[in-house]
Image (spheres, rainbow, N blue to C red):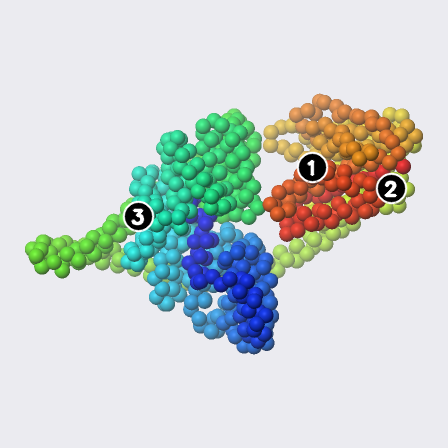
Amino acid sequence: MKKNCFYTFLFFLILIPIYTSAQTKIDTLKSLLLSDQTTERTSDIYSKLGEEYIFTNLNPDSSIKFSIKAYELTKEFKNDYLKAFILKNIGIALIYKQEYDSSFYYFDKSLKIISELDSLDIKSELYNVIGVAYYYKGDFEKTLENWTNELNLNFKIGNKEHIARNLNNLGVIHKNMDQYEDAIYYYQEALKIEEEREDSSSIARALSNIGNIYFHNRSNYVQALEYYNKAIKIYSVLGPKEKEYEADLLNSIGLIYDKQENFTEALKKFNTALDIFTNLNRDVKIAETQNYLGVLYSKLGNFQMASDYIKDSYKYYTNIGAKPKIAETLKAQGDIFLEWGKYQDALNAYSKSYELSVELGIKSDIADLYHKISETYAKLNNYKKAFDYHVLSTDLNDSLFGEKMNKQIAEFQTLYETEKKDKEISLLNKDKALQDATLKRQRLAIWFFTIGFAVISVLLLFIFRLFRQKQKANIILEEKNEKISLQRDHIFQQNKEITASIEYASRIQTALLPPQELIDKLIPDSFTLFKPRDIVSGDYYWLSQKGNKIISVTADCTGHGVPGAFMSMLGISFLNEIINVTNEENLKSDIVLNEMRTLIISSLRQTGSIGESRDGMDMTLCIIDKEKMEVDFAGAYNSLILLRDNELLETKADKMPIGIHVKRSNNFTNHIIKLKKGDILYTFSDGYVDQFGGTDNTKFRKKNFKELLLKIHMEDMNKQKDILEKTLKDWMEGYEQIDDILVSGIRIS
């Protein structure tokens, strides 16, 4: 919650200044393809189209398509600069698609070509975008390594604009790694250069970054507000082009008012920022501001509105794979549940946030989470764990925010103000009318210079010591890399063996499912659409016959993959056991589900205690009696849909699973439904309706699923299956399957 507002738009902050050349119209470039047929010229046009699609239209797929065409043509002539440029643009497009590992492949190829050509400008840009990819992957150490390489190159080139940008970005990454003394040093150095360049926008950005450091020092809100207000004053003069940065600062000021418990002013700032981001269509900023509003509404006691804002924010960050923001949002959700009195939900949210924070190495967030978890355990009267986490929180906070850090920040600030004063004194030396005053100031300047020289000498010694330490660290790193290579090979072999084992388990699971011969015999006019998410599945279907009755089951176990597969095998085993020992006359759907629940709870040793496993399954069970022309149905969460004469009838299931639940003393309900020839019974798990896709990346939803069934139910059953499968494929295009999918249809004949 406390990360600065520049965190989420760092990608654009880094990339936009590099690619600010005049935009070429895409239509004009396409028309040039028709007029110029030379191979090298055509390759250049394709390359420019790829660049336009990523930096102007933000269409990474089209960018990759045209860039690959350009690269293929470069094989027919020698132009290594163009090859490197094209490979770099493909890597950038892959960053937009969050395919970071793939982007490294193209960046490495480009870097090898440029290193041979010794082109410092393009090499600098490559280090920049490689750092961006590692940043969004959550590997801050690799980000720091590449941006430091970029800074060294820009010093050789002498490009002050890029140097200042590098310094700002290095300040951001050091702050996110909780290295505040390093962060403020880089911000101050960037500010010096921007003041020399008289770049108002960059000066405002540097002032804002310094304000962020004082904010994160947890005690300097007054100084943070001072820097924020200086920056926002500059942005307001610059006009609409800096509106987004102005809104970022409004969020930062809102956070300070929030900390000072001035909730009315905080709410005004957040809502004003949200309006600006909405008008600019900045989804990432909307999500960030919704996060802030969610936390604020929680403090105001409106927990439902708070939870709604946080859920919207979490959904966006999950979709784009922004791990730091996912961790932040989970912590905010935990805070809301804690205040709401939902302590177990709070612990779950904090635990997930903690795992991500450890992975990212964000120590300040880890310390805060220790404190929150301690509070939650105290609410649950588990004082032993509450005390343990309190100790962890206190120890980590002491190391992060001690007196040493405050002293170092003050020393850097004093050094900057001193150097600025020296410049003012040197200007006054030119005024002959003030010679006496000048002599005094010169003595003062010498005194300041002496102190400054001493401080700089100490810093140089410190830097030299760090350099020597880095040399030693590099030797150790090489040794570690060799060990890592061996471990990587070992892990690869282990993964290969594990995959082979899972594939064998898949064959076992498939053997336990009803064979097609049995399905054709018992329900010939039917279909089963079964699409496991992984090699093995947590969804399963089951079919059997008892006298004149046909028992059909579709089930969805907790989880998917290997854990879900274990549960599915347990479910199939229990169904066989229950049906085999039950007489045909006593075969009732509710009795079977009640018995299934008893066996699951007993086998998994579930007691309902806080924190224990809640594994189980959702199930639809139909007992079809063709002589009586009726179906006996009972369901655990999953309902039954009957289509008859172009009318859709849904029979709701009980809202409790096959497993431990607060309603475990309640029996399942059986529903007797009269059937007619031509009726179709549909049963399904939640995988189909919950699948994300479409143009807006939303769930397919049950309403659309019902409309689709109503539309296709007159078709042949096999064709229905094909239509369901094609509709799902079209809906999912560009998205991954998130759960196992199971849909079954039976026509009564």
Amino acid at dot 1? Lys
Nearer to me, 595 or 526? 526
Nearer to me, 130 or 415? 130
Secondary structure under tag 3 reads helix
Name which residue lies at 64% across and 46% down: 693
Amino acid at dot 2? Asp
Secondary structure under tag 2 reads loop
Question: What is the crowding at mark 1: few (fewer than 14 residues within 10 Å), some, or many (at least 20)?
Answer: few
Q: Residue furthest bottom?
A: 77
Q: Are marks 2 and 1 in contact (CB under 8 Å)?
A: no
Name which residue lies at 83% across and 38% down: 746
Q: Are marks 3 and 1 in contact (CB under 8 Å)?
A: no
Q: Are marks 2 and 3 in contact (CB under 8 Å)?
A: no
Answer with mark 2 or mark 1, whichever residue precedes in sequence: 2
Answer with mark 3 or mark 1, whichever residue precedes in sequence: 3
Answer with mark 2 or mark 3, whichever residue precedes in sequence: 3
Question: What is the crowding at mark 2: few (fewer than 14 residues within 10 Å), some, or many (at least 20)?
Answer: some
Quadrant of image for the C terminus = top right
Q: CA distance from mark 2 to mark 3?
A: 78 Å
Q: CA distance from mark 3 to mark 1?
A: 59 Å
Nearer to me, 178 or 295? 295
Q: Residue furthest top?
A: 665
Question: What is the crowding at mark 3: few (fewer than 14 residues within 10 Å), some, or many (at least 20)?
Answer: some
Which dot marks residue 408?
Answer: 3
Which dot marks residue 702?
Answer: 1
